[in-house]
Image (tube, rainbow, N blue to C red):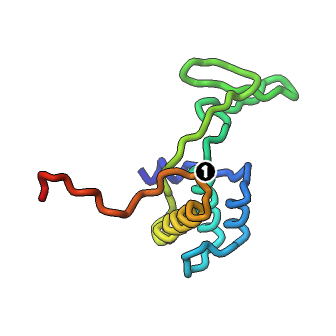
């Protein structure tokens, strides 16, 4: 597994929102006493982008290839179907993901920073991020009493 994850590229933060920009610039996260290191801020910003409303991204099933002639153009290949296109199709993102960082890089702090940021935004009326886990205990059924 280590070999698989070590070959994955770090997330690219192409389309920054005001929230992700604030995190990257080091703005304090409400409710968090610790100061995040730059790599942690990058992780939190990437997770915020993943949790933001659906956005359009290049379809990851297509591989960018360059034509063989001199000055060859860029094409996009779908290996499973051998489909070749001039423009990469776009697809919508899904929320959630896996935080894969080296051990000792304070992954729990990054995750808690994300939760603190999202909780604060929900309290301020920002409903663009939905369904933060409810920490209240589930109601008891009549049979369990």
Query: Which residue is rendered at x = 68% and y = 61% of the image?
Result: 19
Residue most extreme to the right = 71
Q: Quadrant of residue 75?
A: top right
Residue most extreme to the bottom = 33
Instruction: Give SS at disc 1.
Output: loop
User: Which residue, given by chain and number where applicable, does mark 1 sit on?
Assistant: 128
Query: Which residue is rendered at x = 59% and y = 53% of the image?
Result: 127
Look at the image and tell me in which quarter the C terminus lies.
bottom left
Left or right for 28, reference 69: left
Judge whether 140 appears above or below 22 on screen: above
Mark 1 crowdedness (10 Å alpha carbons): few <14, some 14-19, many ≥20? few
Give how far across and how far down residue 80 sits, in percent.
Answer: 54, 22
Left or right for 52, reference 75: left
Q: Quadrant of residue 117?
A: bottom right
Who is closer to the viewer here, 105 or 47?
Answer: 47
Give how far across and how far down residue 15 sits, in percent.
Answer: 73, 49
Who is closer to the viewer here, 34 or 123?
Answer: 123
Residue most extreme to the front = 142
Give how far across and how far down residue 144 sits, in percent.
Answer: 13, 55
Who is closer to the viewer here, 93 or 4?
Answer: 93
Query: Which residue is rendered at x = 49% and y = 57% of the image?
Result: 100
């Amino acid at each position: 597994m280590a070999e698989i994850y070590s070959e994955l590229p770090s997330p690219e933060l192409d389309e920054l929102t005001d929230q992700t920009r604030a995190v990257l610039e080091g703005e304090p996260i409400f409710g968090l006493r610790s100061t995040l290191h730059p790599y942690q801020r990058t992780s939190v910003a990437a997770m915020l982008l993943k949790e933001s409303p659906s956005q359009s991204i290049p379809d990851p099933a297509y591989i960018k290839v360059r034509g063989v002639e001199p000055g060859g153009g860029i094409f996009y290949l779908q290996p499973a179907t051998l489909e070749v296109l001039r423009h990469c199709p776009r697809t919508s993102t899904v929320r959630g993901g896996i935080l894969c960082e080296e051990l000792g890089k304070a992954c729990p702090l990054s995750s808690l920073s994300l939760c603190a940021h999202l909780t604060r935004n929900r309290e301020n009326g920002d409903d663009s991020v939905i369904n933060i886990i409810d920490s209240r205990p589930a109601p008891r059924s009549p049979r369990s009493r």
